[in-house]
Image: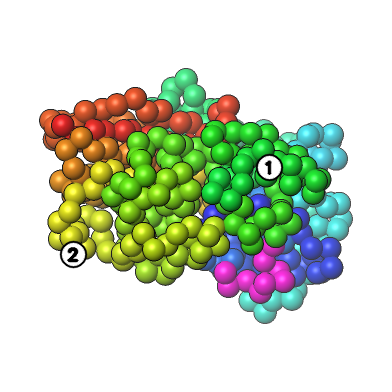
Amino acid sequence: MKPAYIDPPPHADIPLSEQLLAAAQAIQGVMAGRSLSDTLDQTPAALRPAAQALAFHAMRQLGFAQTARAILAPRRPPDRLTEALLLLGLSLLEACLRQADGDVLPQNTPIYTEHTLVHQIVQAAQSHRKVRPAKSLINAVLRRYSRERSTLLPQILGQPLAQWNHPDWWVSALRDAWPQHWQAILQASDQAPPMTLRTNTRQLSRDALMTQLRQAGIAAQPVADAGLVLDRPYPVRAIPGFDQGWWSVQDASAQRAGELLPVRDGMRVLDACAAPGGKTAHLLERHALRLTALDSDESRLTRVADNLQRLQLNADTVRLACADAAQAADWWDGQPFDAILADVPCTASGVVRRHPDIRWLRRAPDVARTAALQARIVDALWPLLAPGGHLLYATCSIFPQEGERQIQAFLQRHPDALRLAAPGQILPGGPDQGDGFFYALLQKA
């Protein structure tokens, strides 16, 4: 999964109708089952920042827009692109009208005047051959919503899909798992996350990096051992030290992995499921290790190498291996590891602030499917750990099947595993403003 660093503002030098159409095409891809990162990769570079900002807003308000569309236009639009443009228009129009009412909107919400937005949405429809026949429908739906909003809103918000902007199964799962916190989790998931850096302490101290940021007019607050939460998101090239490898973008919760795994210089360490390499790099920034970075995706493994090179970390002691972590016989040399980081695949339900399309791409059976995959991986990794060694289990999930229940089942299967102190479940938007994560630290007898 590619990191979503920022919600950049739309580009004023590109016609708004082109921005809207590009965003709708990205949304169309999500409706067809593709990730927003993949669909945005197909967007022309000049349009991509604006399309991302608009599409992110639509993803965070998609349940509201879908419910409103179903009421205003009960017959589904003739094609996905038309529907995507209409959903984008409804989500943006509601933001415009809320601002006109004096509501305080989340940071980075795209705002236009009502007239401009409706006109430009219709212009976007006019510009595309497939959508052009539906421009009158789009115009009529948006204008009716503007006229009748006061009477339509109670009907729309009476539906859980519109109220929470998450699929019904997701809301039910959180309500069951976190009866005291489920509403706060859903509300936090609809907010754009902060931009958090991790200082490369091989290059400079966190205090020195803060000084460099302050001189560039960027305010930041310390978090975790080496982290800095910025006052607002910035393009990475606008922050001092990117090319020099002074820092990486990494969420505060994700930074805990490098701090939690007990390692010392010279240890033999495995980072299973390593791509794109943030945790690999963090371990190497903290210690001189003989490290194996493993991932089943060769193209993503290339990003690990690129990150290590940018951060000027010693790659001579790092082995990059493209293989399935659950098939140890294909890649393990028979020498035990002193420590293993098992940042296993998951539903990514804890990072929907950064990837708001995830909630619409996942299905209820995915939770059990990923939990089964996780169990296979950790069972395969455990024999590779030396006696006395440590395995840190990590997921960016907030579903207990991928966290606490997974570890409880593992301990039942492996009586030689001792559970040590670790944060357990971290819910999104906590004191560190981090994503949802789960950590369990295990020691082998």
Which residue is at the front of the view, 156 or 293?
293
Does residue 281 appear in this view? Answer: yes
Q: Is 129 on the left-hand or right-hand side of 294?
A: right
Label 1: few (<14), some (14–19) or many (≥20) C-alpha neighbours in 10 Å? some
Q: Which residue is rendered at x = 66% and y = 52% of the image?
A: 6
Q: Which residue is rendered at x = 69% and y = 76% of the image?
A: 128
SS for dot 2: helix
The image shows residue 126, relative to residue 157, as above or below, that is below
Q: In which quarter of the image is the C terminus?
A: top left
Badges 1 and 2: C-beta atoms under 8 Å apart?
A: no
Which residue is at the front of the view, 7 or 149?
7
Q: Which of marks 1 and 2 is in front?
A: 1
Residue 209's image quarter?
A: top right
Q: Which residue is rendered at x = 82% and y = 40% of the image?
A: 99
- Residue 18 image point, x, y percent: 75, 70
Determine if the magenta segment contains residue 46. Answer: yes
Q: Which amino acid does label 2 sit on?
A: Asp
Q: Name the residue under label 1.
A: 208
Q: Mark 2 points at which residue?
A: 330
Q: How far apart are marks 1 and 2 (CA)?
A: 44 Å
Label 2: few (<14), some (14–19) or many (≥20) C-alpha neighbours in 10 Å? few
- Residue 221 image point, x, y percent: 68, 34
Predominant SS of the magenta segment: loop
Q: Is 97 on the left-hand or right-hand side of 196?
A: right
Residue found at the very far bottom of the displayed protein: 129
Residue 193's image quarter?
A: top right
Determine if the magenta segment contains residue 438. Answer: no
Of the image marks 1 and 2, the number of the one nearer the N terminus: 1
Segment tinted magenta in the rendering? 41-49
